[in-house]
Image: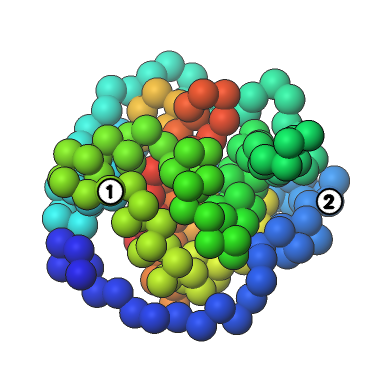
C-alpha cells in the first residue's frame, strides 16, 4: 500500500503487447487517425508518480512548438536490439516503442532494465524524494499489468492512434490520453512520457 493506492493482484492473461502493436502498424493508420479526428491540446503541468498519488501537481514551463512530440531522427522498426554480449538495448523512438518495451520488461520480470531504460529521470527523482525506490514503480505495474495492457490495446500506435488526444506538459513532455468514449471502463486512460537521452521515457499513467 503506497500513499493510499489500492493494489490488486491481476492474472497474466496475455504475453505481450508487441504482437498487437505490430499488427496495427500499417501505412494507412496515420492517415486514418487524421480522418477520425485526432485532436491536440496544450496543457501545462504533470503529476509525477508518488506526488500524483497524494494529489499534488508539479508544473513545468511551457516550451515552443508543442503541437506534437518530437521523435528521434531514427525511428527503428524494432523496439529492442540484442547486443553481441547478449544484453538488451531498448529503442524508445516512439510512444509505440515505449509501450512495447514497458510490456517487455513486465513480461520478462526485469525491474533493472525497466528502471535503467524505460523509467524517466523525473519519475526516479520523484520516487527518491518520497523515500521510495524506483523498483517500487515496477512492482506496482506488475500487479496492474492487465490494466496497462488494456490501455495499450486501445492506443496501439501510441501518439498516432485514433481516438487519442496529445497533451503537451512542458519541454519534450506529453500525455497520450484516450478520448472519453475510448477510455470507458479502463483503470488508466493516459500515458505520460518525456524525451530523455535520445528516447521516450515513462513518467506515469493517469485517468
> In this rendering, would 185 be left or right of 37?
left
Instruction: Look at mark 1 in the image and give the residue it sits on.
Output: 133
Instruction: Look at mark 2 in the image and give the residue it sits on.
Output: 26
Quick check: can you spot residue 165?
A: no
Give coordinates of residue 85: x percent, y percent. Answer: 73, 36
* Mark in the foreground, 2 or 1: 1
Question: How was the colour assigned to the protein in this rendering?
Answer: rainbow
Mark 2 touching mark 1, by CB under 8 A?
Answer: no
The front one of 86 and 2 is 86
- Residue depicted at x 25% and y 44%: 127
Give coordinates of residue 175: x percent, y percent. Answer: 43, 44
- Looking at the rendered structure, the number of numbered marks drawn on it comes to 2
Quadrant for the C terminus, please. Answer: bottom left
> In this rendering, would 206 be left or right of 75?
left
The front one of 39 and 1 is 1
Quadrant for the N terminus, please. Answer: bottom left
- Residue depicted at x 28% and y 23%: 61
> In this rendering, would 138 be left or right of 84?
left
Amino acid at each position: 500500500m503506497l500513499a493510499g493506492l489500492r493494489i490488486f493482484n491481476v492474472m497474466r492473461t496475455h504475453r505481450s503487447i508487441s504482437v498487437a502493436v505490430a499488427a496495427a502498424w500499417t501505412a494507412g493508420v496515420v492517415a486514418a487517425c487524421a480522418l477520425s479526428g485526432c485532436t491536440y491540446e496544450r496543457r501545462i503541468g504533470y503529476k509525477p508518480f508518488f506526488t500524483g498519488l497524494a494529489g499534488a501537481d508539479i508544473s513545468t514551463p511551457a516550451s515552443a512548438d508543442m503541437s506534437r512530440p518530437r521523435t528521434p531522427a531514427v525511428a527503428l522498426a524494432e523496439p529492442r536490439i540484442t547486443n553481441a554480449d547478449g544484453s538488451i538495448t531498448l529503442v524508445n523512438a516512439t510512444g509505440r516503442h515505449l509501450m512495447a518495451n514497458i510490456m517487455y520488461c513486465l513480461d520478462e520480470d526485469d525491474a533493472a532494465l525497466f528502471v535503467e531504460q524505460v523509467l524517466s529521470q523525473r519519475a526516479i527523482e520523484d520516487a527518491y524524494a518520497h523515500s521510495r525506490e524506483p523498483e517500487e514503480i515496477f512492482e506496482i505495474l506488475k500487479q496492474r499489468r492487465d490494466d496497462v495492457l488494456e490501455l495499450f490495446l486501445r492506443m496501439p500506435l501510441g501518439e498516432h492512434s485514433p481516438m487519442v488526444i496529445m497533451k503537451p506538459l512542458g519541454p519534450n513532455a506529453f500525455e497520450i490520453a484516450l478520448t472519453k468514449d475510448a477510455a470507458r471502463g479502463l483503470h488508466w486512460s493516459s500515458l505520460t512520457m518525456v524525451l530523455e537521452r535520445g528516447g521516450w521515457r515513462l513518467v506515469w499513467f493517469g485517468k
